[in-house]
Image (spheres, rainbow, N blue to C red):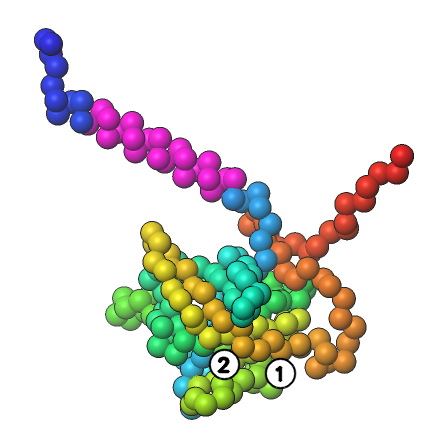
Amino acid sequence: MPGFNSTMMVRLYSTAKISIHDITQQKFRETMGRICNQAMILTTAVPIHCNSDRFRGVTLSSVTSLSLMPIPLIQFNLQLPSFTSDFLHDFNHFALHLMKPNEQSIHLARNFSKGAMKNTHNGEIVPTQPFVGLQEGVEYDTYDINGTNLRIPLLKNAERVIVCQGLKTFNVGDHEIWVGKVEDIVNRTSEEGADDPISGGLLYCNRNFHTLGDPIRKKSG
């Protein structure tokens, strides 16, 4: 065929494929932004004598129950690379916080979502320090893991804290999926002696935090 060039065909096909992929990514991002997710904070186990400036944690919107039988399992995913992931692999215990739907939880969720930062002196990428500025005994305490020399920092401004041991991990794309075995649940509300209504936790949708709304009532008639 006059003027036909196989290289041209490859380039045209590649460009079209990339364009379709980009459009799908944009549509997917917009669609997922319409979904309301639970904003939970994960904190990792650390050696028992570790200082709070080395505590690790991250805000998650991917936590979901996986199974109840034969043992309770929970799952979440993390984007890689991640300093929090490094600690999870090193120490294999973590806590997931069902946060109260209030302003303090929003502040904590934003603080724990900052990820890594660049050292202004040498340009090195270093982990953030989400527990710096938090007072032990007031804003958090620690949970000793039986049979180990590890402890997990637990935030006070939570309704429940799910204490887990890592069971399996799977790498998918630029994320890893974690499956955790639930070993304990700490009821923060009962510790305070307060009422314990089902609040729905701290919800995140379309780049904003929300509280649970009223139930949808069936119209009479």
Residue 204 seen in the current view:
yes
Would residue 36 appear left or right of 29 to someone viewing this image? right
Residue 160 percent across, percent down from the top left: 63, 72
**Above or below — where is 191 with respect to 158?**
below
Q: Could you tell me which quadrant the C terminus lies in?
A: top right
Q: Earlier in the sequence, mark 1 or mark 2?
A: 1
Magenta highlight range: 11-31
Q: Is residue 160 magenta?
A: no
- Point 46% across, 39% down: residue: 28
Judge depth for marks 1 and 2 and give the one in front.
2
Q: Which residue is mark 2?
A: 152
Q: Position of residue 48 (x, y in %)?
A: 44, 89
**Residue at 40% across, 67% down:** 168
Instruction: Please give the residue where the numbered disc 1 appears in the rendered image.
Output: 138
User: Would residue 16 appear left or right of 139 to someone viewing this image?
Assistant: left
The kind of residue on which mark 1 rests is: Val
Task: State the image coordinates of residue 198 (x, y, percent, origin top left).
Answer: 73, 63
| Label pair 1/2, CB-CB below 8 angstroms | no
Q: Residue at x 53, y 60 (%)?
A: 66
Query: Which of the two residues, 1 or 139, is positioned nearer the viewer here?
Result: 1
- At a point 37% along the width and 56% down the height, the residue shown is 175
Amino acid type at circle 2 is Ile
Residue 5, quarter of the rendered image: top left
Farthest right residue in view: 221
Q: Secondary structure at mark 1?
A: loop
